[in-house]
Image: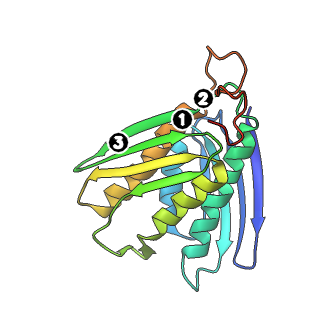
Amino acid sequence: MRTASVARKTKETQISVTVNLDGTGRYSVATGIGFLDHMLEQLSRHSLIDLDVQATGDLHIDFHHTTEDTGIAIGEAVAEALGARIGIRRYGSAVIPMDETCTQVALDLSNRPYLVWKVAFSKPKLGEMDTELFKEWFQAFAQAAGATLHVENRYGENNHHIVESCYKGLARALRQAVEIDPRSDASAPSTKGTLSGSL
């Protein structure tokens, strides 16, 4: 089993994360932000990565620190569980339709962090959560996981559907990318022989 646990403690947040890349999509998520919990549950369920996230943060200020730091902690746990990234498929992609919305996500677990975010919202908030924070979460995750991540909402009207399709797209892309390739010769999927910032 490729598992990892990460604890992150700052003056702003206290977060513990455990992942199992070879899981079945079981989750236990409590961040204090209901909508974020819902998205992380979607991430676990559709990636089949078991995910435990327990977080407390300075929600009396706003949701920024808790949102960003959960992205960092989950990304760090995924990176740790991947280890040297030997034998993984490395790439994953998904096109997710959700009612009137369609979003495309492409992922490379290259150990070269980069986010392309082509997602726009028509409202500044979803419930109590600022919609601008979703980019912050994806940026934090990509940076910590060592992932090149492209997220593009092709079209959509409902902001809930747009966000949820982004997380489901990431989940499905991750499911492919972390999978061990049965045809692999137990080496890193790179002509350089390593995934430490390599092409």
> Horizontal and vertical percent for residue 52?
66, 52
Q: Which quadrant of the figure contains the N terminus?
A: top right
Q: Tag 2, which secondary structure?
A: loop
Report the residue marked by disc 1. 175
Query: Label 1 crowding class (10 Å Cα cut-off): few <14, some 14-19, many 20+?
Result: many
In the picture as drawn, the residue positioned furthest to the bottom comes out as 61
Q: Is residue 126 above or below residue 90?
A: below
Residue 144 seen anywhere in this rendered image of the structure = yes
Left or right position of 173 against 17: left
Q: Nearer the viewer, residue 180 or 158?
A: 180
Residue 35 seen anywhere in this rendered image of the structure = no
Q: Amino acid at mark 2?
A: Glu
Task: Report the residue at 69% width, 36% height from top.
Answer: 195
Left or right position of 138 against 146: left
Task: Report the residue at 48% width, 58% height from top.
Answer: 38
- Residue 118 is drawn in which quadrant? bottom left
- Disc 2, disc 1: CB below 8 Å? yes
Task: Report the residue at 64% width, 26% height from top.
Answer: 189
Q: Earlier in the sequence, mark 2 or mark 3?
A: 3
Query: Label 3 crowding class (10 Å Cα cut-off): few <14, some 14-19, many 20+?
Result: many
Q: Tag 1, which secondary structure?
A: helix
> Horizontal and vertical percent for residue 163?
39, 58
Q: Amino acid at mark 1?
A: Arg
> Horizontal and vertical percent for residue 168?
44, 46
Report the residue marked by disc 2. 179
Q: Which quadrant of the figure contains the C terminus?
A: top right
In three-dimensional space, the C-alpha distance between marks 3 and 1, rounded to whole angstroms, equals 14 Å
Task: Report the residue at 65% width, 75% height from top.
Answer: 57
Report the residue marked by disc 3. 96
Q: Is residue 150 above or below residue 63?
A: above
In three-dimensional space, the C-alpha distance between marks 2 and 1, rounded to whole angstroms, equals 6 Å
Left or right position of 12 against 129: right
